[in-house]
Image: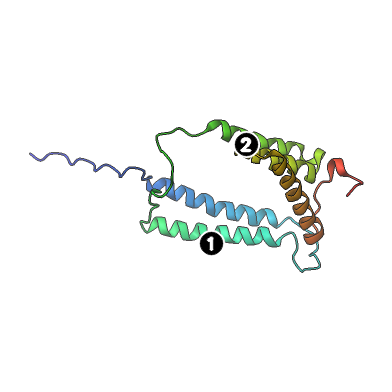
């Protein structure tokens, strides 16, 4: 009488191939979603020749290429090795408070963007994220947040010709 074969245990930290294939398909679908969403953008190109569709198409195309390569790799038997160089303790639970705060900050930004406008809203977003993620010099974080928000506003509005909401600063900008 033969004994039933015992299943060999998976190495610690190793994910199932199905999960890796799902992630690969999500990356591929996200690229398609970005390209499809960009097709509805109709704005003239800037003086540099780059319009508001350039970067989303670039990112969407990169996601599609990476997704296809990832799907092919997973179907050929490739798998991600567990990170051994990370300086983390897998036994310590995730910091759900920080995850919730970051998620709440992004949600508040999305909800208030039209009212506050890009510069004010993005400044609060960047500052809130910096403080949540551990910035100790709050004045410096606030100044950097305002500089980033104003810089991105100018880059998109003046450089790419994309209209961003002015919100509270309507008439000033």
Real-space CA distance between mark 2 and mark 1, rounded to the nearest whole angstrom: 34 Å
Q: Is 84 on the left-hand or right-hand side of 143? A: left
Tally the marks.
Answer: 2
The residue lying at 24 percent from left, 43 percent from top is 8
Establish if 43 lies above or below 133.
Answer: below
The residue lying at 35 percent from left, 56 percent from top is 77
Find disc 2 in the rendering and name its residue: 132
The one of 167 and 86 positioned closer to us in this rendering:
86
Give the image location of residue 154, x and y in percent: 80, 55
Find disc 1 in the rendering and name its residue: 65
Please tell me whether mark 2 or mark 1 is closer to you in this view: 2
- Quick check: marks 2 and 1 in contact, CB under 8 Å? no
Give the image location of residue 156, x and y in percent: 77, 56
Q: Say what secondary structure mark 2 lies in.
A: helix
Give the image location of residue 33, x and y in percent: 62, 52
The residue lying at 77 percent from left, 68 percent from top is 48
Residue that sits furthest to the left in the current view: 1
Q: Is 131 on the left-hand or right-hand side of 69? A: right
Q: Say what secondary structure mark 1 lies in.
A: helix
Establish if 14 lies above or below 58.
Answer: above
């Amino acid at each position: 009488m033969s004994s039933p074969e015992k299943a060999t245990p998976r190495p610690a930290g190793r994910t199932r191939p199905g999960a890796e294939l799902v992630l690969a398909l999500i990356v591929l679908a996200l690229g398609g979603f970005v390209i499809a969403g960009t097709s509805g953008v109709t704005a003239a190109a800037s003086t540099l020749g780059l319009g508001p569709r350039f970067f989303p198409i670039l990112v969407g195309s990169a996601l599609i290429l990476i997704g296809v390569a990832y799907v092919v790799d997973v179907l050929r038997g490739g798998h991600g090795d567990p990170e051994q160089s990370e300086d983390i303790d897998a036994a310590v639970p995730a910091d759900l408070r920080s995850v919730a705060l970051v998620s709440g900050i992004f949600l508040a930004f999305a909800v208030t963007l039209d009212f506050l406008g890009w510069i004010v809203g993005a400044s609060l977003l960047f500052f809130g994220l910096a403080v949540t993620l551990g910035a100790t010099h709050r004045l410096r974080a606030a100044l950097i947040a305002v500089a980033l928000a104003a810089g991105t506003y100018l880059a998109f509005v003046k450089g790419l010709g994309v209209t961003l909401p002015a919100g509270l600063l309507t008439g000033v900008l």
